[in-house]
Image (cartoon, coloured by chain):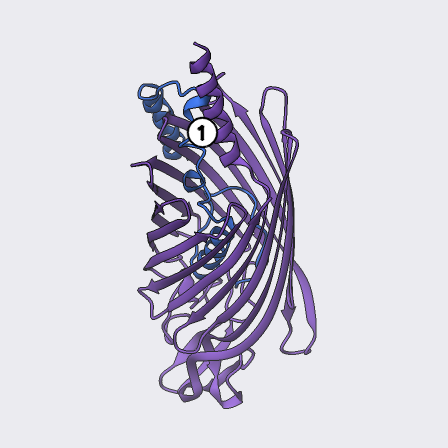
Amino acid sequence: MQLKISLAAATLISAMALQAEDYVSVQYLQYDENKNRTSISAPSLIFNKDFGTDYTLNLNFVADAVSGASETWYDGASGASAFSRGENVNADDVTYGNVDYEDTRTAGGAVLTTRFDNRDELTTGLNYSMENDFKSTEVSGEYMHWLDSSKNSSLSFGASYQFNEVLVHDTVSGGSEAVDADAINVQLSYFQNLNAESYLKASIFYIGDSGYLTSPYLNVVRNYDSVANTADVVQENRPDSRAAYGISLKYANAITDNLSAHVSYRYYSDDWDIDSHTIDSDFYYELHDDWVFKVGLRYYMQSEASFYNADKDHFTNEEYASSDKRLSDFNSLTYKSDVEYFISEEWSVNLGANYYDQSTDLSATYFVGGVTYRF
Amino acid sequence: MKVFSSTLLVSIFLLSGCTVDVKPWEKETLAKPTMKETGTNPGIKKYEEHIYFSKEASRGGSGVAGGGCGCN
């Protein structure tokens, strides 16, 4: 009996050791799109520390350097710029193509998890993000309640609110104006350990966007006149609100001692008529005690927004109009791979190569490399 | 919304009939880093979610916090 208790205690200690969350991780992302479009270099830092058994603090920081070009309509007679707009311009000059841009983004966040006597958890967070033309402050909170004494099932409710500020350029006056675009995100989740090797999580969520949801840098063509051979190149216009609902299901299973699989599905629907389905999978293979290999495949498909059209001769006086391909009907595949090597119990290095391919003409490669120190 | 709520309730109902009571000392496998929701490396997950957020028109389902982005 004593031996049995000792073995159980040893196993529990081992499991707790595996859950130790104290680490510092430095990662670097290099993201490059085809056709000389967006390139991003993004170093990041994550610090995670347990304070006793009741508190966990997570701090994260990322700095993006973005350069390249994005596609939109513009009046080629006045240059390849997002602000090359005009009414009754020569239709032969109306061009859909790359316009150059550069941006930097710095973002940081702090998340504190507090555990109570019954081991319920309250997670509170604060995120801040700043770009040349965009600022965002987000507050979030989530409460997780255990439903059983063995802590195999739980219910979580979380909410966040984003205060966003967009800097909009006025092509007439040449000045800029700061406008608001806020977002609320609410999620209810149910978690269940199915057995000693698998669990499932089911969530429903609501996201509400309000304010200035139009892109300051994207244009549409209106009033194309094939007889006079003229057209208007003007800024796109989107509704000032968006309500989205969705459900997500995630299942993880340790198939063998060293092979585990994660599979998830998400359904999303909003009042811009966009519906999407996402199926994601990741497989982890542990080789000896010092290598972890990951391969993954993600499939995504969406329907187009009600006010989307890519043609030059479509829009006239509709209130809402956009030619942003991200609002179009498309699907995408992401091929993921990553390897992590544990130099010691404290140190590990990781390197990943990934490929993202949309059914639009967009594709991208991204590499992630980093170092993690556990203490 | 009714569809979503119904699906969640059905999931909970189904799960209640096919789960076993896993004791704390039986959770070694569940506690492994490869079984974490975020995967073994939360930093990679954050990068990926940011890429999808900036290149696709839908989001959500992976938690309420994430920070903003002027990706438009």
Q: Which chain is purple?
A: A
Q: Which chain is blue?
A: B
Q: Is residue A27 left or right of residue A32?
A: right
- Of A324 and A186, which appears nearest the observer? A186
Residue displayed at 65% across by 78% down:
A172
Question: Quarter of the image containing the N terminus of chain A?
Answer: top left
Q: Is residue A51 left or right of residue A306?
A: right
Q: Is residue B39 above or below residue A173?
A: above
Disc 1 crowd rating (10 Å Cα; few below 14, some 14-19, many 20+) is many
Q: Is residue A14 above or below residue A160?
A: above
Residue displayed at 39% across by 50% down:
A291
Q: Whole-percent x and y of residue A366?
A: 43, 65
Q: Is residue A51 left or right of residue A8?
A: right
Q: Whole-percent x and y of residue A10?
A: 48, 24
Report the number of discs: 1
Kindly indicate the quadrant of the structure image that contains residue A51: top right
Looking at the rendered structure, the kind of residue marked 1 is Tyr
Q: Whole-percent x and y of residue A226?
A: 36, 83
- Of A50 and A359, which appears nearest the observer? A50
The single residue placed furthest to the front in the displayed view is: A3
Q: Is residue B44 in view?
A: yes
Chain of the residue under the numbered disc 1 shown in the image: A
Q: Is residue A171 left or right of residue A41?
A: right
Residue under label 1:
A190
The single residue placed furthest to the top in the displayed view is: A1
- Of A272 and A130, which appears nearest the observer? A130
Q: Whole-percent x and y of residue A305?
A: 40, 57
Report helix, strand or loop for mark 1. Answer: strand
